[in-house]
Image (cartoon, rainbow, N blue to C red):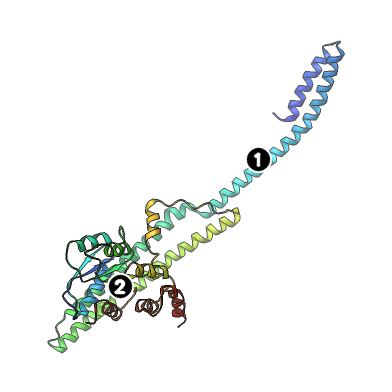
């Protein structure tokens, strides 16, 4: 099935600069419908608001709710549990990667990353575009 | 009162009693015993005096040495000057990098929005914006110098604390209990970027998500990744 390039994507990070970088990379990849949140709590509220996000790209280290906690909440929510979820972190300790995978993350990107890596990971999660 | 003075006083008192011309031989015997006791006690208290005196001298010297060592740490200089300066330098580094990133990203966004209707005009605009981007990269020199100053302060503190610890033979006390927020951070947040790059490389993570390796193999995969 063709990827809907107009689908809303939620980018979650407590660093405005990182959100801006990902927004620009997504724009280059053809995704313009991007919303943002500064932590898991704000992100989960936005997701529950019914925007129907087709993809969540989230950092791990955020307060008060981490990206890992957001992932678990999303996977535990009947309506949201099928949302594709990519985790992006600066630290990739083995146990963290495994914990995220077991919690149901669809892919995992280590910072710093480039547009090609982001495209490859998004493709692996939602299909080629 | 020193032990010798006490002994002398007691001896005088005993002599006064003897001089009172008492006839009771048992009392004289008691007085004689008391004299012997005073002589013994004089020796005992005399040695005790020297011992306590020696201990107090030792403690006084230790306190003086500790005070000198603390003074050598220059704690007021560290607290009032070096640490605030280092903190201000780090804040400036954060601001400098943030400003540079903002500038570079804005220029990049502007370039992407340029319309290449006229090639010559387009190139001139791109060149002009690229110069702005290059200029913004000068933050690296400034922040490098700021970070060097902070490193120098940390080295200064580290050397003095290490010397103090060695000279005074200090052993580490039990770690202070973390407050609730620190505890939450310890349990929920990652430590941030690792010094020698990510522990598990993107290739090993990809292999895990592609199903090429299992969770149990990820550790070895990461090690292989480092040697590949």
Chain bearing tag 1 is B
The residue positioned 80% from the left and 19% from the top of the image is B14
Circle 2 residues within 10 Å: few <14, some 14–19, many ≥20: many
Kindly identify which numbered label has been placed on residue A106: 2
Chain bearing tag 2 is A
Q: Nearer the viewer, residue A66 or A98?
A: A98
Kindly identify which numbered label has been placed on residue A98: none
Q: Relative to A38, does residue B71 appear above or below in the rendering?
A: above
Secondary structure type for disc 1: helix
Q: Which residue is mark 1?
A: B56
Q: Relative to A72, does residue B44 appear above or below in the rendering?
A: above
The residue positioned 74% from the left and 27% from the top of the image is B5
The C terminus of chain B sits in image quarter: bottom left
In the figure, residue B186 lies in which quadrant? bottom left
Secondary structure type for disc 2: loop
Residue B203 pos. (x, y %) = 38, 79
Circle 1 residues within 10 Å: few <14, some 14–19, many ≥20: few
Residues under numbered marks 2 and 1 in contact, where contact means CB atoms less than 8 Å apart: no
């Amino acid at each position: 099935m063709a990827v809907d390039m107009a689908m809303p994507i939620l980018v979650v990070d407590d660093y405005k600069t990182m959100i801006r970088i990902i927004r620009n990379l997504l724009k280059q990849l053809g995704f313009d419908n991007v919303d943002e949140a500064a932590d898991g709590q704000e992100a989960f509220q936005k997701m529950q608001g019914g925007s129907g996000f087709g993809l969540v790209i989230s950092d791990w280290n955020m307060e008060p709710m981490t990206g890992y906690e957001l992932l678990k909440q999303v996977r535990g929510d009947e309506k949201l549990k099928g949302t594709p979820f990519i985790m992006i972190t600066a630290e990739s300790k083995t146990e963290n990667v495994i914990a995220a995978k077991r919690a149901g993350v669809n892919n995992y990107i280590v910072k710093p990353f480039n547009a090609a890596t982001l495209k490859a990971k998004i493709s692996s999660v939602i299909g080629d575009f | 009162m020193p032990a010798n003075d006490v002994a002398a006083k007691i001896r005088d008192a005993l002599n006064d009693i003897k001089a009172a011309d008492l006839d009771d031989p048992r009392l004289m015997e008691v007085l004689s015993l008391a004299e012997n006791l005073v002589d013994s006690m004089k020796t005992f208290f005399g040695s005790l005096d020297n011992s306590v005196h020696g201990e107090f001298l030792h403690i006084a010297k230790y306190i003086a040495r500790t005070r000198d060592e603390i003074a050598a740490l220059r704690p007021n200089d560290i607290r009032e000057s070096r640490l605030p300066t280092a903190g201000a330098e780090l804040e400036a580094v954060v601001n400098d990098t943030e400003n540079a990133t903002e500038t570079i990203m804005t220029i990049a966004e502007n370039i992407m929005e340029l319309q290449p209707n006229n090639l010559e005009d387009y190139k001139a605009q791109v060149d002009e914006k690229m110069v702005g981007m290059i200029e913004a990269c000068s933050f690296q020199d400034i922040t490098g110098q700021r970070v060097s100053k902070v490193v120098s302060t940390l080295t200064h503190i580290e050397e003095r604390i290490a010397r103090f610890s060695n000279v005074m033979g200090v052993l580490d006390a039990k770690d202070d209990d973390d407050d609730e927020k620190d505890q939450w951070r310890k349990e929920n947040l990652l430590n941030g970027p690792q010094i020698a790059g990510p522990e598990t490389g993107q290739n090993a993570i990809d292999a895990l998500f592609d199903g090429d390796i299992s969770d149990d193999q990820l550790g070895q995969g990461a090690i292989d990744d480092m040697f590949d």
